[in-house]
Amino acid sequence: MKAPRAPFYKRMWFFLLILGPGMVSAMAGNDAGGTATYSVIGANYGFKMLWLLVIVGIGLATIQEMCARMGVVTGKGLSDLIREEFGVRWTLFAMIILLVANIAVTIAEFAGIAASLEIFGITRYLTIPITAVFIWWLITKGTYRFVERFFIAVCFIYFSYIISGLMAKPDWALVLQNTVVPHFEFKANFIMIAIAMIGTTITPWMQFYLQSSIVERGYKTRQYGMERWDVILGAVVAVVIAYFIIVACGATLHTAGIQVHSAKDAALALSPLVGSSAAMLFALGLFGSSFLGATILPLSSAYAICEAFGLENGISKKLSEAPVFFFLFTALILIGAGVVLIPSVSLINVMVISQTANGILLPFILIFMLLLGNNKKLMGEHKNSAFYNIVIWGIALFLILLTIILLFSSLVHF
């Protein structure tokens, strides 16, 4: 006899308990660099790139689901699987790609923290050291469960972007039209920002963090149904928030002919157009997203590198049990915070370059993931479906094509 289903409220409570890795990893993608990228898109191109965001959102949900599925089925992190299936040389190549991208993005996260609090008149030379110390204390002294619940709480700050978008009172008919009707420009700036959009929405580090978190939680295959919803919900919420950042800036800054180069510029420019409340909410969202990113990025790097070379890792470990893990985590925090405190460093360039680098490097990681996800011996009946392969190969090939066009256009001043 088939067992009766649990009451709805019990199923919802279980879902809230399991909610975590998928939501945190997807939301962390809307970090400082992401907010800056979406702000520039809205200010410079209005609503014209909303259609691409929808497609990228489908790709995000698909890729994250595949990554989570591999973690549950194999019980191993992504870099661990890459080492076992492709050998040490390819693992070293993947880790170099990840580390280069993550160092740049970690710097961008601390730049976002500095920029968001400078809007409130607080100097970075005070906020950055305090934030860096707090992040280090949180990870080295907290348990995995406590840290994850803290991350979920921080995610709620992101909803300030949605409120800002609604306060901007956009032309919803025009928004909807641009959501479903594609627009593309064969110009270097447009192609670069398109790569940056994909690179900030679907990042290499997100996949390593997500799979490592699922492994540390100890999920079994029978629990995957609920975790799958965690991943899908996380992707949907993350894309909706990105959507409203673009809408907020498109309805105000683009309409007024104001171009910006960072999220801080966007927040300051919003104030005279839609009021100081919307600008402050935007700045609050920038701080929350930057803080989450500045914590997740060093964690992702430490997880991936330690897994790749068979070293002890995990938030729940003590410092003495996983010294390399905590050393890598600490080193990235020091680099990220330290660079931002150098007066001559252009924070705007760091943010944009970091997201473009993510977009260019992402196909390499996706190819590793696709080969793993289609490995019958590794995944059994849980290997990729044809739909997953079409979507993810499409994203990878599209990024490669955009990168080639960008390089060509730069060479011939297209």
Image: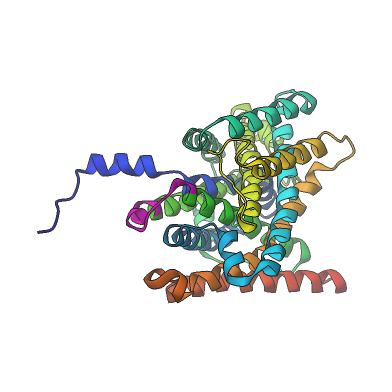
- Asked where in the image residue 201 lies, by quadrant, the reply is bottom right
Q: Is residue 407 above or below residue 97?
A: below
**Most foreground residue, 211 or 86:** 86
Q: Residue at x 75, y 27 (%)?
A: 129
Q: Tell me if residue 262 can be seen.
A: no
Q: Quadrant of the C terminus?
A: bottom right
Q: Is residue 178 above or below residue 161?
A: below
Q: Residue at x 34, y 44 (%)?
A: 15
Q: Is residue 388 above or below residue 301?
A: below
**Most foreground residue, 314 or 348:** 314
Q: Residue at x 58, y 67 (%)?
A: 84
Image coordinates of residue 130 in percent, x first then y, are 71, 25
- Colour scheme shown: rainbow
Q: Residue furthest left?
A: 1
Image coordinates of residue 211 in percent, x first then y, are 52, 54
Q: Is residue 387 above or below residue 163?
A: below
Q: Residue at x 70, y 31 (%)?
A: 132
Residue 23 lies left or right of residue 30; in this view the side is left
Image coordinates of residue 66 in percent, x first then y, are 47, 63
User: Would you say the magenta stretch is mainly helix, strand or loop?
Assistant: helix
Task: Say if the magenta span includes residue 59.
Answer: no
Image coordinates of residue 191 in percent, x first then y, are 72, 65
Q: Tell me if residue 266 can be seen.
A: yes
Task: Say if the magenta span includes residue 226.
Answer: yes
- Asked where in the image residue 275 lies, by quadrant, the reply is top right
Q: Quadrant of the N terminus?
A: bottom left
Magenta-tinted stretch:
216-227
Count all numbered tags in the image, as a single digit: 0
Residue 367 lies left or right of residue 21; in this view the side is right
- Asked where in the image residue 113 lies, by quadrant, the reply is top right
